Image: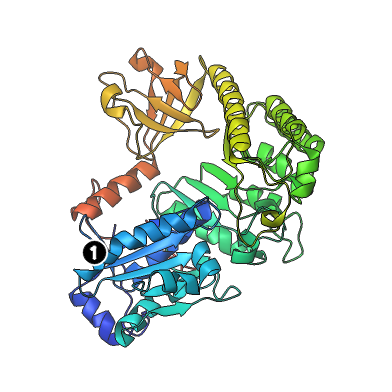
Amino acid sequence: MSLTVSSPESSPVSAPLAAELLQHPRTYQVRTFGCQMNVHDSERISGLLENAGYVPAAGEEADVVVFNTCAVRENADNKLYGNLGMLAHVKETRPGMQIAVGGCLAQKDRDTIQRKAPWVDAVFGTHNIGSLPALLERARHNDEAQLEILESLDVFPSTLPTKRDSVYAGWVSISVGCNNTCTFCIVPSLRGKERDRRPGEILAEIQALVDDGAIEVTLLGQNVNSYGVEFGDRGAFAKLLRACGSIEGLERVRFTSPHPAAFTQDVIDAMAETPNVMPQLHMPLQSGSDKVLKDMRRSYRSKKFLGILDSVRERMPHAAISTDIIVGFPGETEEDFAATLDVVEKSRFATAFTFQYSKRPGTPAADLPDQLPKAVVQERFERLTALQDRIAAEENAKQVGTTVEVMVTAGSGRKSEETGRLSGRSRDQRLVHFSVPEGCEVPRPGDLVTVPVTSAAAFHLVSDPATAGDYSLRRSRAGDAWDRSQAESCGVPAPGTTGGKTGVSLGMPALPPRS
């Protein structure tokens, strides 16, 4: 990948530091905890730092370590402070090393981080990611820690430079924040009310990704199907999906996460009628008990949820549906839990992300009576996961004998060295481990293979084509982009290129080629 360094006049750091970084670039590392939104924010953080002249650390301890934190996951604060404690000793031996903490936990804890970890140089929140380079410089210049937390969005994150983790697929944020008031969730207080990007900006970013070789995008938001409410168009999300269908070269479109209460038929129709929108849906259930859903302030009930799944499968019979479920919400009875098991059985989820409820300070649910004992929650959790594992295995077994198109990914399975298999995702997002028949060309990440499913397990499919005739490879622009990125990282021209570098930072409204 190439590195774009702003001129001192346009850099987010001062002219003297910009000149210094050009001569002796400082290295950085971003450590990400949490959800897809955090992962996407980390791409922005990396892009900002590279735009300011920093370079990725290659094996060695970085000059700047940035923690992008989560406040939703259990023990998030313990994980952060454990990592900070280990780095404190490293920092003592490395003069000039800096540590920054951002993300949801930084937005929530604020002064607590500096009190518990005074060796942290910069603390920034979810609303001012773009301040990081300036905060780091100010901390160096003033020799004291810098704290900047804004209560509302300063600059829409998608206007910031970005360094993408993948060249063949990318996240595209369509909104930030959330207008819902779920009692277990702290996200609205940390990311604020929903802010929607204009469709033209989103489509321009997608086009820039595609122009640089990506063939898959995932539209990202806390509640994607409420997109458009801010500018008065409740049908905007369905329209956006259909618009994605007109982008030449974009082969796969996904989105996460919708809310059942706002999920409408026009979105289902757009999914079914737009060929590059994948037959896959993540639809968070949270609980199958209507009483618990009411206590969670989830403005739908189990009948509506199951009706949505019926409507999706009526239009897309082979759609794979995944979900989120919380076990042990305060006041959940055995009858409530049985209702969840019943809905899970009827829903036939391909995958479920299951969580044991734990208190989140600052959420209404943390103060509810009838908090359940850990042993009760654990026992129910084990019953739920056993049920879902059985269903997932049964649903995957139905795929045996079918043929699937798989987009090859860079990461392989844990047993890849033993089996010799590569990995990728089918159109419905199932994980597929596949082997390449002897004498056949090996695909690159981003290429697409069409293979038969020969066996299945609860969490993946397996394809071992018996002959070369059972294996088909389509080399793609995304695979070409992978070749270019690997060549640039080694400083050599990619096959079929002249060796010229392309830009990697992506910001709006200026849209240079992306990596």
The structure residue drawn at horizontal position 41% and vertical position 65%, both measured from the top left corner, is 45
474 vs 143, left or right, is: right
Total tally of numbered discs in the picture = 1
Quarter of the rendering containing residue 290: top right
Residue 126 shows in the view: no
Dot 1 lies on which element?
A: helix
367 sits to left or right of 304 = left
Residue 210: % across, % down = 46, 51
Instruction: Give the quarter of the figure containing the N terminus.
Output: bottom left
Residue 158 falls left or right of residue 465:
right
Residue located beneath label 1 in the image: 90
Residue 499 visible in this rendered orientation of the protein: yes
Q: Position of residue 319 (x, y in %)?
A: 63, 31
Counting from the top left corner in percent of width and height, residue 39 is at 46, 54
Front position in the image: 99 or 346: 99
Relative to residue 83, is residue 250 depicted above or below?
Answer: above
Residue occupying the point 61% across, 27% down = 383
Kind of residue indicated by mark 1: Val
